[in-house]
Amino acid sequence: MSLGTSRRIVRLAVTAFLFCLAAASAFAQAPAPPTPNKGDVAWMLTASVLVLLMTVPGLALFYGGLVRTKNMLSMLMQVFFVVCLVCIIWVLYGYSLAFSEGGSLNAYVGGLSKAFLAGVTPESTAETFTDGVVIPEYVYICFQMTFACITPALIVGAMAERMKFSALVLFIPLWVTFVYFPIAHMVWYWAGPAATVGAAKTLAAATGDAKTAAQAAMDAVTANAGLAFGWGALDFAGGTVVHINSGIAGLMGALLVGRRVGYGKEAMPPHSLTMTLIGAALLWVGWFGFNAGSALEAGGTAALAMINTFVATAAAALAWMCAEKVAKGKPSLLGGASGAVAGLVAVTPAAGFAGPMGAILLGIVAGFVCMFFCSAIKNMLGYDDALDVFGVHCIGGIVGALGTGILAAPILGGTGVFDYTTGKVGDYDMLAQFITQAKAVCLTLIWSGVGSFILFSFVKLVVGLRPGTDQEREGLDLVDHGERAYNY
Amino acid sequence: MSLGTSRRIVRLAVTAFLFCLAAASAFAQAPAPPTPNKGDVAWMLTASVLVLLMTVPGLALFYGGLVRTKNMLSMLMQVFFVVCLVCIIWVLYGYSLAFSEGGSLNAYVGGLSKAFLAGVTPESTAETFTDGVVIPEYVYICFQMTFACITPALIVGAMAERMKFSALVLFIPLWVTFVYFPIAHMVWYWAGPAATVGAAKTLAAATGDAKTAAQAAMDAVTANAGLAFGWGALDFAGGTVVHINSGIAGLMGALLVGRRVGYGKEAMPPHSLTMTLIGAALLWVGWFGFNAGSALEAGGTAALAMINTFVATAAAALAWMCAEKVAKGKPSLLGGASGAVAGLVAVTPAAGFAGPMGAILLGIVAGFVCMFFCSAIKNMLGYDDALDVFGVHCIGGIVGALGTGILAAPILGGTGVFDYTTGKVGDYDMLAQFITQAKAVCLTLIWSGVGSFILFSFVKLVVGLRPGTDQEREGLDLVDHGERAYNY
Amino acid sequence: MSLGTSRRIVRLAVTAFLFCLAAASAFAQAPAPPTPNKGDVAWMLTASVLVLLMTVPGLALFYGGLVRTKNMLSMLMQVFFVVCLVCIIWVLYGYSLAFSEGGSLNAYVGGLSKAFLAGVTPESTAETFTDGVVIPEYVYICFQMTFACITPALIVGAMAERMKFSALVLFIPLWVTFVYFPIAHMVWYWAGPAATVGAAKTLAAATGDAKTAAQAAMDAVTANAGLAFGWGALDFAGGTVVHINSGIAGLMGALLVGRRVGYGKEAMPPHSLTMTLIGAALLWVGWFGFNAGSALEAGGTAALAMINTFVATAAAALAWMCAEKVAKGKPSLLGGASGAVAGLVAVTPAAGFAGPMGAILLGIVAGFVCMFFCSAIKNMLGYDDALDVFGVHCIGGIVGALGTGILAAPILGGTGVFDYTTGKVGDYDMLAQFITQAKAVCLTLIWSGVGSFILFSFVKLVVGLRPGTDQEREGLDLVDHGERAYNY
Amino acid sequence: MKLVTAIIKPFKLEEVRSALTDLGLQGMTVTEVKGYGRQKGHTEIYRGAEYAVSFLPKIKIEVVVPEGTVDKAVEAIVRTARTGQIGDGKIFVSPIEHAVRVRTGETDDSAI
Amino acid sequence: MKLVTAIIKPFKLEEVRSALTDLGLQGMTVTEVKGYGRQKGHTEIYRGAEYAVSFLPKIKIEVVVPEGTVDKAVEAIVRTARTGQIGDGKIFVSPIEHAVRVRTGETDDSAI
Amino acid sequence: MKLVTAIIKPFKLEEVRSALTDLGLQGMTVTEVKGYGRQKGHTEIYRGAEYAVSFLPKIKIEVVVPEGTVDKAVEAIVRTARTGQIGDGKIFVSPIEHAVRVRTGETDDSAI
Ligand SMILES: Nc1ncnc2c1ncn2[C@@H]1O[C@H](COP(=O)(O)OP(=O)(O)O)[C@@H](O)[C@H]1O
Ligand SMILES: Nc1ncnc2c1ncn2[C@@H]1O[C@H](COP(=O)(O)OP(=O)(O)O)[C@@H](O)[C@H]1O
Ligand SMILES: Nc1ncnc2c1ncn2[C@@H]1O[C@H](COP(=O)(O)OP(=O)(O)O)[C@@H](O)[C@H]1O
């Protein structure tokens, strides 16, 4: 029983005593600041660890298994390096840019008030989505850090087997600074439940002139949010911020770096589907931290997010396998794994909003669409998105973002949207929500697409994007890192 | 501090006030429905994730490493596919068949009242084993889902390297429907603590005619349970439901599909004991979710289950290695890993009942028995249970189930059995319990053995169980999935 | 809400009632013994699992990937075997020797009062670092067990590829008994918060003659601690106990077993850096259980330990890569992974004391120092510490232990040291603390260095340390275990 | 002496080996190779990419035998390696002018 | 018959193979080998240890051809395998006295 | 020209290679092979299954040398590859009729 709780109980007992002497509500008196519930802390600590697991080794292996032996280490290295680098950038200024009040630029990006985690102590807390429920701010920072780490790591798959390490070293800091942090701020930053509820209460209570003042306060609170959040876009765990964002950036990278030497002529089979399966499985496992952790509490919503993350993934994997069976005669493990990832991507924004049956539907659609995109359409367009970052993460992310607008509807078993001003789930306007979702998708596609294009071009100019043909043939492991992955 | 808790405290304060005016017990008044403790939620979310980790990649790698390279993917694929398929079946009707009231068939299987998770919301809760303690139903569904996924996945190891994928696709849905769900219901379904305790209280309080009515009510509650549960069989985390069940099914499969081409003539060494070790380790890691999670609460019983899962596993691994050292001159890694799994299997039903010293003993016995069975006896009988699913899971499960009857005895450091009607641990009759355990074992062996035999035969008739000899020689990876695991 | 909690509330309500009749403080009355908060239990269960994950498969793969194919299994086997063996020893007498009162030897080692976990039940609790906060003792035993398992497992890397399995079988039990358990006791054993706070309170309240008695009691409590703990040495999660300890032991082993055949002449490249990366990543993932779990609670301190474990690791990995880039022209994956481990080692003692910025600094220093040591100095000295156990764990551990003395300073963003007698963080004397840290380091170096040297020499005498040259050439997998890791 | 080189199906190795040892041939060297020939390969599909694989795993056995034993050896291999299906493989015989046993320095027939 | 042995750069295999099949050669055997020669290798560094690796991955193609086809085969390989840079490889021609097709027992030219 | 084929113990490769380069031989091709011979193998046990493994890992070195260098090459290999224990391996010499350097088209002695 946490100290906080016991303190409350003491206070309460005395209170009860006062009751009897003068029956005055002790609870009208200013309440102590909320303290974290250790159950929430336990879950969020675990969730943060799971998201790291999902990136290294998860994503690293999923990608690594898909490249040729000679580029295995470069793949592992790129993912691992991105994670390390972004961890540091995050605590230096990333967290602040994403999650602090941004003054005049607040609609687009945060400020530097929390740079170097200024003012954060083991006692400081961050609000969850429930008024009065908080978690230690350090936990919140860790959890969000893992998101900032995996997003750029997803990009590298698109330029796999042919992008110089030095180019990556230059690109990543630029990209997170100008693309990721702003988008995270635009989609996720808001004033928080306490302020919202408080302002709403005051407004409700206010009368006469006070009303206008209260209304102004209310508007100020509502205005204190990122652009997309302000629109009311729903993104439970990062469909836009993480997947559409990295997917479109990957496409830009693939186009600017160009095709691999021998692409289309030489066979480039995955060097180890075993590693890819391990990676896919760890992605699934870790994704529960990603999705269920995004509830920020250990409660019913986390549970909903978890079951959705189970069934949507399973459904998408089965869908992809079926599609393969029909289209190519045989269901493949790579197909199953790809489908699972597509399902995970699609359910990400919907995890806490859709019902299980809705999630299954979403998974099936994502499985089919991505499978079709990665085989038919991609070959048609002929660009070399080596590991289908665009086809799975961007396309799957779009399916998920739009699908969320539909499946969040209570009539479809969704949760609807909680209205903090009224304190209950509001009426659900599917069309309006769908349009809002579409707007958020476009915002992300444009900001990240244009931003990434500019940054890749800049890097190409400064250090160049790819090695010489002979070096590329020799493999990035030896050329960039002077090692070989296997010496059997 | 969860909202639920604060609500309680408010209620309490008011209560205390009423006390003073009219000293009547506020607690006699209908209490609010129990709300989950976030600590329990946090642990059960984690436990569910751990059981998935134990299946994919855990089990997939443990099995995959043991087959030849040409069948690696088929092994991974079969486990992965089973997990995905059963996830979906579980939410469609599996959960309902296993854990809802089954009307006239209630002793054997549940009903369809919860098909499609009808009526389940993020707010709905499921009871734990403690009166008044609940967890979100979605968490309970997820946790039990992972059990339903791993059990059929265990079976595939017996027919490894020679069973057609199409046969599996047909077999799995049938098997979970007619074998797993019923057995889970028979062993685990009951009315729950609240009803039991409530009925017991009323009975105790009742006088005169009321007594007979109360007695009837009590009997009704006790009767509302699966067959084996009604007998009083102890199975903490699924020794019968999961391991004996899959083990005997595997044997039937191995017999009906027949031996691998070249079995006994050609060498069939494991293609990667590294993968097998990774798998075994992840099985151990994930099994803590499986066993300690089966306490459904984050408390002392979970802790007991955890330490037992540590020591029984370690003891069994050491026992197997010693046996090898003596019998074959060298302790092997595969022996150690196999021993660990045998220990995990054996401790599964005993985890929350035996004491640590008892668990060590159980592990040692399981290690020796399974080692002896997998080398001596199996070779004697000459059937081709490719990955020793029967020898480890069924034999180990039986050792565990019977051992539980002995080691649960308080005199042997066990916890004894909690009697909800009296509210305390009852006297322990070892012989009676041992017999009950034996009955449960037989029930499982017969139901699953016969059922699996029928289903495999049916599948053999409809699509056939195995590919042609040449195809089998070429390997299932290419034949069934058109891929190769490695392209070094 | 735990039963404990509800019980409290009932008691409280009644109390409140009594209040009204006779306003006497119910809280002056003896409080019930504290019961665990389920949030803490949930986190500590998870943390224990994470530390196992970090050892098997984590450490096993990190080490295994670095050896040649022919010794892969022996590496995996040695780590796995050590874990199993120590699990058993721990519950038999290890826990007791490390964490029970040791009578006259109490400064150096515990007693046997808890051998066979005598008296431990699912209800027994162990204190955390907060007065009145407890966790189930079984959880505490499991958590500490995982530490006892990984420490000797770390040693085997130093003698990799050339130490007989039989030698290890003899060495490990001796080493944990005479080196690990005593050092754990010396560094971590103390009377606990309750006793300390209690004694302090009494002392404060006492007057006249009572004062002397109270003072005596206070002194007794303070005296009831391990040697290094008594000095006031800070070691949050085991920098001295685990890393310096195993590192110096590894060096002794490497010296006594001698160099590998062909060392310096034949190429001995890692057989699979892929496995090494998986291992390193799982070490990182599991280390959060190791460090954040060492807070023993799910709260702000655990959160601090977590973020420090993120950034110090990332910083050290980047530092090592940079150093390589400068010194050898190319940053390597092995360098990054080695750096990450060095950072994890260094932050271990500091995790709960330093601030994030301090942790970054610590990581950078550890990365550079260890990189320099493992390449330049080691080659200079010419001993064959096969997997750099000394260079990374001992050197990194020393950097961390000393660094903790500096970075714990509040002026450097550290937490300072909590003074239980005054109930708040005391003034921080950096120099004094630094010296204390240095003393603890020396104590560990000497005790473990001398002890390990003696034990290795003894084993060499009794069974010999290494196989014949031909056997070593054939590889330990076949010679010791009769298996091969891969049969592609 | 002659070098008899046989390319066979992998799972036939054990049979062929014992047949050769039965002829009193005490040594041979084996290599994993990939073979291209009449035997058709297979197609592999990885997401969007399809590859026609025409090289199949084969085993190459090289055994140096005294003049006299060549025919017996060839016959033994043909007998044991044959399945009657396309892809059974080939046997090639080529001249060896000189042989040395490293350990002893013995040469020619006494070296093999 | 002659055995034409070509050591080439791995990524050239496909081109060479089709060139040979265009000549009507219906079979060949391929082996992954490591080559040492004028082409310089590379250095690998693992923590403190540095290794100079002088052996490079190459592909060895062995094709047995009728006398008449030798020159055409050699010419085809040279044409397709050449990149003009050090390490392109070598071609060796050696005699084959006898050939057998395991499946049918056919011998010599009709066996290949 | 002659093809000198040596089958040796893997860990001897480096020594043999440098001995050959010391003779001015600028190239060679190496293959990982499995050898069967007098040298006894080992037994592997996997749970219930025991396998006697009679093939041991060996290295095959192929070097084409001008007539004149054959004996020196053979002598150098024998000297460096010998450990005096069973399994040291064999050396075989066979004729090469023609050689071509792919890069330049140079032929015969000037090609190697
Ligand atoms: N001309 C050749 N030179 C070298 N190896 C050959 C030649 N022809 C066939 N082979 C080898 O023999 C194997 C079997 O030949 P293939 O034509 O497939 O079947 P079959 O031997 O029954 O005619 C091929 O995979 C290849 O390794
Ligand atoms: N004397 C030789 N005997 C056998 N193989 C050789 C010989 N010389 C070269 N090779 C093979 O040919 C390959 C290419 O030779 P190298 O000297 O590197 O380039 P180039 O062929 O352009 O002169 C080498 O890697 C080796 O495998
Ligand atoms: N007749 C042979 N033809 C081809 N290779 C052979 C022959 N005899 C032996 N070898 C090769 O030489 C290696 C060593 O031969 P072995 O009889 O084991 O020892 P030793 O060479 O000392 O007599 C074998 O492993 C095999 O690879």
Image (cartoon, coloured by chain):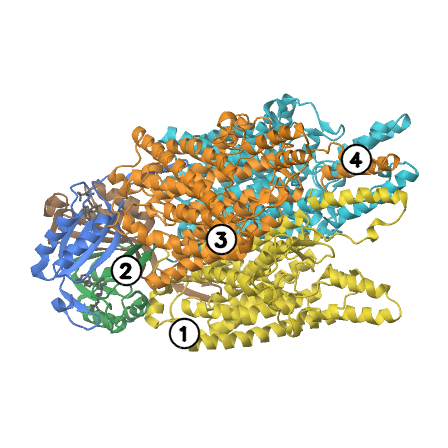
Chain colours: A yellow, B cyan, C orange, D brown, E green, F blue
* Left/right of residue A420 with respect to residue C428 in the rendered view: right
**Residue C15, visible in the rendered structure:** yes
Q: Which one is in front in this view, the residue at disc 1 or the one at disc 3? A: 1
Which of B266/A290 is in front?
Answer: A290
Mark 1 element type? loop
- Residue E29 tag number: 2
The three-letter code of the residue at mark 1 reads Val
Q: Name the residue at the left extreme.
A: F68
Residue bearing the label numbered 3: A278
On the image, the x and y values in percent for residue C386 come to: 33, 46
Mark 2 packing: few (<14 Cα in 10 Å), some, or many (20+)? many
Q: Which one is in front in this view, the residue at disc 2 or the one at disc 4? A: 4
The three-letter code of the residue at mark 4 reads Ala
N-term mark: 1 or 3:
3
Q: Mark 3 lies on which chain?
A: A
Q: Which chain carries label 4?
A: C
Give the Cα separation between the discs numbered 4 and 3.
58 Å
Count of marks overlaid on the render: 4
Residue at image location 50% in from the left, 25% down from the top: C104
- Give above or below for C415 relative to E3: above
On the image, the x and y values in percent for residue B413 come to: 60, 25
Give the Cα separation between the discs numbered 1 and 3.
34 Å
Q: Which one is in front in this view, the residue at disc 2 or the one at disc 1? A: 1
Which of A297/A470 is in front?
Answer: A297
**Residue C168, visible in the rendered structure:** no
Q: Mark 2 lies on which chain?
A: E
Mark 2 vs ligand 1: CB below 8 Å = yes
Mark 4 vs ligand 3: CB below 8 Å = no
Residue bearing the label numbered 1: A463
Which of C188/A69 is in front?
Answer: C188
